[in-house]
């Protein structure tokens, strides 16, 4: 869903629709805050560790690009 849609103005002229909208807002505000379903792993902040991770990633990506499907060697 595009977040820009929350900035549109709209008019509710039907009193019942306005009540349903207000009820929906109230219900949404009562829900517990969102939590990630998995635990966040190790947070990498060391520049050398980050550099090593990206070098490893580059190496794996290069290996993937150089591999040919079976039977095409």
Image: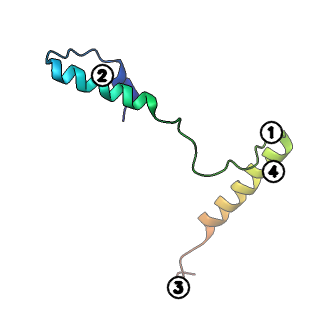
Q: Which label sits in the foreground, 3 or 4? A: 4
Dot 1: within a 10 Å radius of its alpha carbon, few (fewer than 14), some, or many (20 or more) residues?
few
The structure residue drawn at horizontal position 66% and vertical position 65%, both measured from the top left corner, is 63
Q: Foreground: 9 or 17? A: 17
| 65 relative to 51, above or below | below
**Label 4 vs label 1, nearer the camera:** 1
Which residue does the numbered mark 2 point to in the structure image? 22
**Disc 1 designates what residue?**
45
Mark 3 or 4, nearer chain start = 4
Q: Position of residue 24 (x, y in %)?
A: 32, 29
Q: Distance between the residues labelled 2 and 4?
A: 52 Å
The residue carrying mark 3 is 71
Label 4, label 1: how far apart the Cα atoms are: 12 Å
Judged by depth in the image, the label closer to the viewer, 2 or 3, is: 2
Kindly identify which residue carries mark 4: 52
Q: What residue is drawn where x is 66% and y is 50%?
A: 39
What is the C-alpha distance between the residues marked 3 and 4?
A: 34 Å
């Amino acid at each position: 869903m595009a977040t820009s849609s929350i900035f549109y103005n709209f008019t509710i002229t039907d009193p019942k629709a306005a009540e349903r909208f207000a009820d929906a807002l109230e219900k949404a505000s009562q829900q517990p805050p969102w939590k990630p379903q998995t635990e966040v792993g190790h947070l990498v902040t060391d520049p050398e560790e980050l550099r090593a991770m990206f070098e490893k990633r580059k190496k794996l990506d290069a290996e993937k690009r150089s591999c040919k499907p079976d039977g095409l060697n």
